[in-house]
Image (cartoon, rainbow, N blue to C red):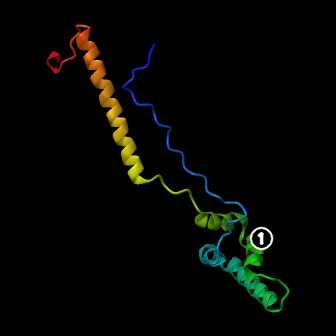
């Protein structure tokens, strides 16, 4: 079978772009603190506050180079890995949604292809003598 010359090629479906989430991206410690603390019970909250204060003391004494890095490394052990990971995932970058204009254009193209196919089908039916008009209902 020979493809119809007037039929436009089918475009590839839109695929979300991957987001670089490797070593370049790190969660914001202040945002994690804001998200984690309300999820903790009193005991865990006190233990976490002790960790933060201890890490601040170590940073001020020059024992650790970065409070943020130490908090990101040691925080999950105090608050629980599931809670910590949920708060990290809340701020992880996501692939942007497809452009609304591009989606509208693709819908218009699909409708044009559908109408062109319907027109060809109706012409073929009329040429074969089977009709295809609306008055046959």
Question: As drawn, is 19 to the left or to the right of 61?
Answer: left
Q: Nearer the viewer, residue 107 or 77?
A: 107
Residue at image point 23% right, 9% down: 130
Residue 92 picture quarter: bottom right
| Residue 28: % across, % down | 64, 74
Q: Nearer the viewer, residue 94 or 15?
A: 15
| Residue 35: % across, % down | 60, 73
Residue at image point 22% right, 16% down: 132
Residue at image point 83% right, 92% down: 61
Question: As drawn, is 57 to the left or to the right of 125?
Answer: right
Looking at this rendering, what residue extends furthest in the bottom direction?
61
| Residue 7: % across, % down | 38, 27
Q: Nearer the viewer, residue 37 or 135?
A: 135
Q: Element under label 1?
A: helix
Q: Is residue 26 above or below residue 94?
A: below
Q: Is residue 128 above or below residue 4?
A: above
Q: Crowding at label 1, few (<14), some or many (≥20) Cα neighbours within 10 Å?
A: few
Looking at this rendering, what residue extends furthest in the left direction?
135
Give the residue at mark 1. 77
Residue 31 picture quarter: bottom right
Task: Count numbered badges in the picture.
Answer: 1
Q: Is residue 136 above or below residue 89?
A: above
| Residue 106: % across, % down | 40, 42
Residue at image point 61% right, 72% down: 39
């Amino acid at each position: 079978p020979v493809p119809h010359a007037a039929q436009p090629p089918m475009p590839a479906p839109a695929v979300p772009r991957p987001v670089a989430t490797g070593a370049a991206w790190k969660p914001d410690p202040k945002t994690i603190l804001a998200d984690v603390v309300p999820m903790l019970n009193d005991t865990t909250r006190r233990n976490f506050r002790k960790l933060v204060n201890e890490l601040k003391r170590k940073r001020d004494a020059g024992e650790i180079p970065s409070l943020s890095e130490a908090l990101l490394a040691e925080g999950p052990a105090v608050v629980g890995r599931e809670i910590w990971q949920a708060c990290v995932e809340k701020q992880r970058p996501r692939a942007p949604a497809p452009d609304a204009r591009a989606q509208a254009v693709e819908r218009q193209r699909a409708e044009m292809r559908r109408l062109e196919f319907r027109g060809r089908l109706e012409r073929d039916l009329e040429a074969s003598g089977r009709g295809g008009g609306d008055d046959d209902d």
